[in-house]
Image: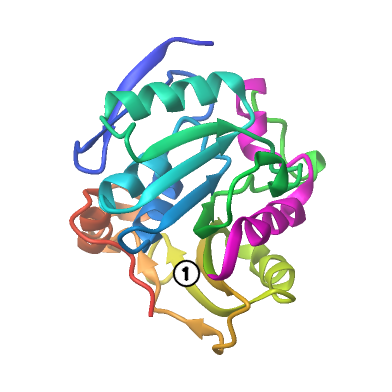
Amino acid sequence: MSKITEDRVLGGRVRLLQPARGYRAGLDAALLAAACDAKPGQRVIEAGCGVGAALLAAAARRPDARFVGVERDPEALALTRENIALNGFADRVEAVAGDVGQRFSALKLAPFDAAMANPPFFDDPDRLRGPAPEKEGAWLADDGLSAWVQFLLKAVREGGTITVIHRADRLGDLLGLLAPKAGGVQIRPIQPFADVPAKRVLVRAVKTGKAPLRLLPALVLHDRQDTGEHGGKHSAEAEAILRGETGLPWL
């Protein structure tokens, strides 16, 4: 493993050990954690938790809920466990070895109240220029988006929630995979600027839910007048979310 850095996220509330090179936790993990709306006493599972960035930020936001992260890469899993201890969360957060490409039942865990994930954005390696080897697992889904959705659906009880952040152009695929067994879908677009199409979407669905689909107001990450053309300073709403001062609520 490359050199390890210690970073702080969620306004400094969470300490995070992660590799200096390769895939590093960023905005997607922060937004996924902000969208976790677990109630006190509920159990949450994150599929593909990496080094635990979203897992630990969600746990910091929801101090009365319990969390389990699932990770197949042994080095990332080891760092997740270190990060759990580093933040003093060992009494209600754990990380276990597991592969989304296998059945949820292989973990021998009871179904959860909620599941969340930031699946790899690409199924086909020909769709992008090859990432560095240390990033490949985070960018390329060996078993496709379908395997991730099926894992999440199996991981939650009836009435449980599934929350996913993904590329906006995969929204149709994601909804199609959720549709047979989940409803009550809510979609929140994530736009770089107010006048630019969304590049990410947060999607929340309820297993066996029947409520109609709802399209929520978009989160705009940057104010054009403050950032120029290529990003920079976050909008006030985005900054408050990243600092943990507010979340991304669902209806």
Residue at the (32%, 35%) spot, across then down:
91
Judge whether residue 155 is colored magenta. Answer: yes
Residue at the (48%, 42%) spot, across then down:
68
Task: State the image coordinates of residue 133 (x, y, percent, origin top left).
Answer: 67, 21
The amino acid beneath tag 1 is: Pro
34 and 63: which one is in front? 63
Q: What colouring style does the render use? A: rainbow
217 and 210: which one is in front? 210
Task: State the image coordinates of residue 32 (x, y, percent, origin top left).
Answer: 43, 54
Q: Is residue 144 left or right of residue 230?
A: right
The answer to whether 94 is drawn above or below residue 74 in the figure is below
Task: State the image coordinates of residue 157 (x, y, percent, origin top left).
Answer: 58, 65
Q: Quadrant of residue 136?
A: top right
Kindly report the secondary structure that dominates the magenta region of the rendered protein: helix
Q: Is residue 37 left or right of residue 129?
A: left
Which quadrant does the C terminus fall into? bottom left
Which residue is the site of mark 1?
189
The answer to whether 103 is drawn above or below residue 162 in the figure is above
Task: State the image coordinates of residue 64 (x, y, percent, origin top left).
Answer: 27, 53
Residue at the (39%, 38%) spot, across then down:
93
**Residue 199 appears in the figure:** no
**Residue 123 appears in the figure:** yes
Q: Quadrant of residue 34?
A: bottom left
Which quadrant does the N terminus fall into? top right
Residue at the (64%, 64%) spot, across then down:
169
Where disc 1 sits, the SS reads strand
120 and 219: which one is in front? 120
Judge whether residue 109 is colored magenta. Answer: no
The answer to whether 63 is drawn above or below residue 8 in the figure is below
Q: Is residue 205 left or right of residue 251?
A: right
Highlighted magenta segment, given as a residue range: 133-159
